[in-house]
Amino acid sequence: MTARKPHITTAGADPRLAGGRLTIDLDALVANWRFLAEKSKPSNTAAVVKADAYGLGIVHVVPVLWQAGCRTFFVALAEEGLRVKAVAPDARVFVLNGFFAEAFPIYEESDLIPVLGSLHELALWKKLNKSRKEKLPYVLHVDTGMNRLGLSVEEALTFADDGRNQKPVLLITHLATGDNPAHALNQQQFESFQKLRTAFAGIESSIANSPGIFHTEKGEFDLSRPGVAMYGGEPLSDAANPMRAVVTLEARIVQIRTGLMGETVGYGATTTLKRDTRIAICSVGYADGYLRSSSGSGVPLRNAVPGGGEGFVAGKKVPIIGRVTMDLTSFDITNLAERAVKPGDYIELFGPNIALDDAARSAGTIGYELLTSLGNRYHRRYLHTKTAD
Ligand SMILES: *Cc1c(COP(=O)(O)O)cnc(C)c1O
């Protein structure tokens, strides 16, 4: 294999006209998937690409994962599944968000596989398959402690005992407290799932999301299902992030102005300047998914990070000043050298210098929400080194 310089594929808005740009390092994404696959061994490793691959784009993400050897993909909606199939026709695609009867013809045509999670859905599936000689495959979702989707453990055990039932191709459950390995619920969920595996002997099973990969016993289950860690998010909340950063978000500086001591900044006049302050007004706001709860002041509900978000520019971190607005956000750049930045320069909002999860914490949320909120006004650059095998 010969490594080359990354090839850049562009998408989204014209960079000359856009307020911000997203750089998505597909090499880092693939490296992250390989790392997770290595950690999951001897289990196989799927990829969760719901919500348009956590906001990064199914059409860009799925082909490189396929190339890296990923063969199984999870999506939330059948519509997303079709988009996976369009770029990876031979992929095994599981649809997590339940099943409605009117979608059956699409499942028949498209080779998507539903994840069924209630007795109602199983009955529907059985009825719709009745006239078919070859029954379509499905995955069975069992709820072991999340109280979201899935049969109860008792329902699943009864279902397994009835020899007339069509067997699932995969048995899954989902961890409620995976990012907190010390939580007692993990052990309880593992134990329930082990019971189910015995009842569904011979059927592939899957429990670990990104966090789960870091604390399940090696090879305990057959298939892991990472999402956020593949995209560079931290798998565990109380440990250093071992994943490579994948996404960099930058916004353009539109204007630099000086506010005088005693003046206020922004909507609600929530910040009063304590000194004469140089302010960089940047072309990004909550309409771009740069959340208003990152504001430097005036966010009554945020308690974890009272100071608000930061940008990184000219080698330094600079705080948000005042409220994030729909299209613009202001940063206090008084501590930068006079000519360090000018209109048209980019300021990093997260990426190599500000971790995705730190940016998320500043907004009182998690990396998942920042990624899946990324708007469609950005210029997008996808970096990928094509390797000659
Ligand atoms: C979203 C999801 C995953 C992936 O979770 P991450 O924490 O992003 O790794 C796995 N399984 C199910 C059922 C999910 O809904």
Image (tube, rainbow, N blue to C red):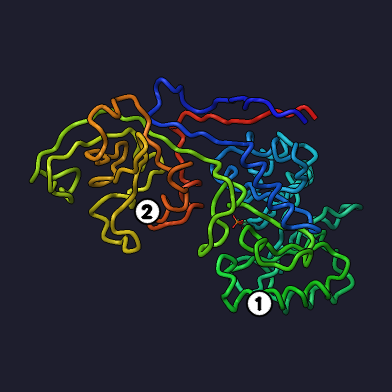
Task: Return the residue at label 1.
Answer: 187
- Give coordinates of residue 81: x percent, y percent: 68, 44
Q: Residues within 10 Å of mark 2 (few under 14, many from 20)?
A: many
| Residue name at image x 85 percent, y 64 percent | 203
| Residue name at image x 70 percent, y 64 percent | 207
Tag 1's secondary structure?
helix
Q: Is residue 212 left or right of residue 290?
A: right
Tag 2's secondary structure?
loop
Res 1 → quadrant: top right
Res 342 → quadrant: top left
Which sits in the foreground, 242 or 326? 242
Give the distance between the C-alpha atoms of the residues marked 2 and 1, in whole angstroms.
31 Å
- Give coordinates of residue 49: x percent, y percent: 63, 46
Disc assigned to residue 211: none
Which sits in the foreground, 183 or 285? 183
Q: Is residue 385 left or right of residue 123?
A: left
Above or below, comparing residue 63 to residue 172 in the picture: above
Quadrant holding ligand 1?
bottom right
Quadrant (top left, top right, bottom left, bottom right) of the C terminus: top right
Is the residue at mark 1 in contact range of ligand 1, meaning its CB lies under 8 Å from it? no
| Residue name at image x 26 percent, y 60 percent | 300
Closer to the N terminus: mark 2 or mark 1?
A: 1
Residue type at mark 2: give it.
Ala
Q: Is residue 304 visible?
A: yes
Residue type at mark 1: give it.
Gln
| Residue name at image x 48 percent, y 34 percent | 22
Task: Return the residue at label 2.
Answer: 363
Q: Residues within 10 Å of mark 1 (few under 14, many from 20)?
A: some
Q: Is residue 123 visible?
A: no
- Give coordinates of residue 35: x percent, y percent: 69, 50
